Image (spheres, grey):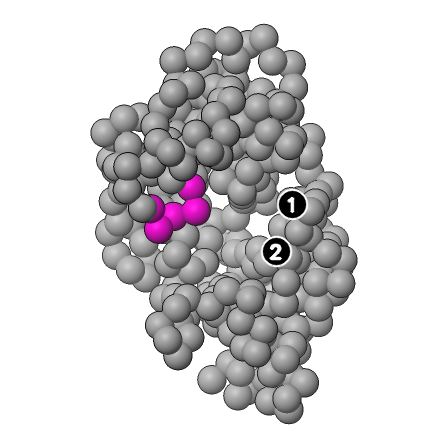
Amino acid sequence: MAVTNSYRGRLAPSPTGLLHLGHARTFWIAAQRAIQHSGTLILRNEDLDPQRSKAEFVQAMLEDLRWLGIRWQEGPDCGGPHGPYSQSERRDRYLAAWRSLRDRGSIYPCTCSRKDLAQAASAPNEDDEPVYPGKCRSRTDAARFAEPAGVNWRFRAPEGGPVGFPDLHLGPQEFMAGRDFGDFVVWRRDDVPAYQLAVVVDDSAMRITEVVRGADLLKSTARQLLLYRALGWKPPAFYHCDVVLDESGVRLAKRHDALSIRRMREAGRTEGEVRG
């Protein structure tokens, strides 16, 4: 289909396991929205974590997405003007953003251990990153670090500052820094850029105009909007899909192997049945 406008959507799977039914639903919606807008769909291989990303899962996700009937115009398998399309090959871009945030005073080095954070947590947090208690927030020595390795780097979220955005599916959203999330990690002590930073850098560089993803990432969107603001970049629009749950009401994860696209294919399901 010829591209008639500037709409650019994306698929961003991580090769840390087999794609499951929840991924299939979200990626199908993303593909359909790109078609509806006569736009371009980009596939990005989010192989950022060297410990968890596996080459066999990269191949599996490409095969499973094609089997579902999803087609993209740019990606690691077909190239494009905004590559490379694998995050493991984009480190220089993440470093440039880290330096920019460091020079602006937007981030600071943090030496707190996981044990420190667990002991400081005053209440359970359903998010994967508890609200940071602020022990290292007053540090002012960021400028002495030429490279990010060796410490965690946290974004200095504005305390008590609301972060709101219109979601194209779920309606108006608002989160409060300091309550819903704290100073979040943008670069890990093992020298791996964190998800929040990498996604913002890549979506901006790849000129993504709309991000389609699961509603479990709404809080991540609030964090990422703060990064867009700090870096002076225009954010995309957001469309958060309803989360797919298993029979017990738990959100699907890659541990649900029986509900992976690959296992359903092997069981004889058709692509139409899975999409349905």
Q: Which mark is first along the chain, 1 or 2?
A: 2
Task: Determine if the magenta segment contains residue 69.
Answer: no
> Horizontal placement of 117 versus 187: left or right?
left
Q: Which residues are magenta?
A: 125-129
For the point 55% across and 38% down, which residue is it?
A: 194
**Amino acid type of the residue tagged 2 in the rendering:** Ser
> From mark 2 to mark 1, how far is it between C-alphas?
9 Å
Task: Choose between 179 and 78: the one closer to the eye.
Answer: 179
For the point 63% across and 50% down, which residue is it?
A: 46
- Disc number for residue 241: none
Task: Choose between 55 and 82: the one closer to the eye.
Answer: 55
Task: Choose between 274 and 17: the one closer to the eye.
Answer: 17
How crowded pointer 2 is (Cα within 10 Å; few <14, some 14-19, many 20+) is rated as many
For the point 44% across and 12% down, which residue is it?
A: 139
**Amino acid type of the residue tagged 1 in the rendering:** Asp
Instruction: Look at mark 2 in the image and give the residue it sits on.
Output: 14
- Contact, mark 2 vs mark 1 (Cβ under 8 Å): yes
Query: In the rendering, at what x and y percent does residue 160 appear?
Result: 23, 29
Location of residue 22 with respect to 195 vertically, above or below: below
Q: Magenta part mainly helix, strand or loop?
A: loop
Image quarter (top left, top right, bottom left or bottom right) of the N terminus: bottom right
Question: Dot 2: what SS?
Answer: loop
Query: In the rendering, at what x and y percent does residue 222 appear?
Result: 36, 41
Dividing the picture into quarters, in which one does residue 152 lie?
A: top right
For the point 53% across and 71% down, which residue is it?
A: 256
Query: In the rendering, at what x and y percent does residue 249 appear?
Result: 35, 72
- Residue 156 shows in the view: yes
How crowded pointer 1 is (Cα within 10 Å; few <14, some 14-19, many 20+) is rated as some
Instruction: Look at mark 1 in the image and give the residue it sits on.
Output: 49
Task: Choose between 6 and 98: the one closer to the eye.
Answer: 98
Question: Dot 1: what SS?
Answer: loop
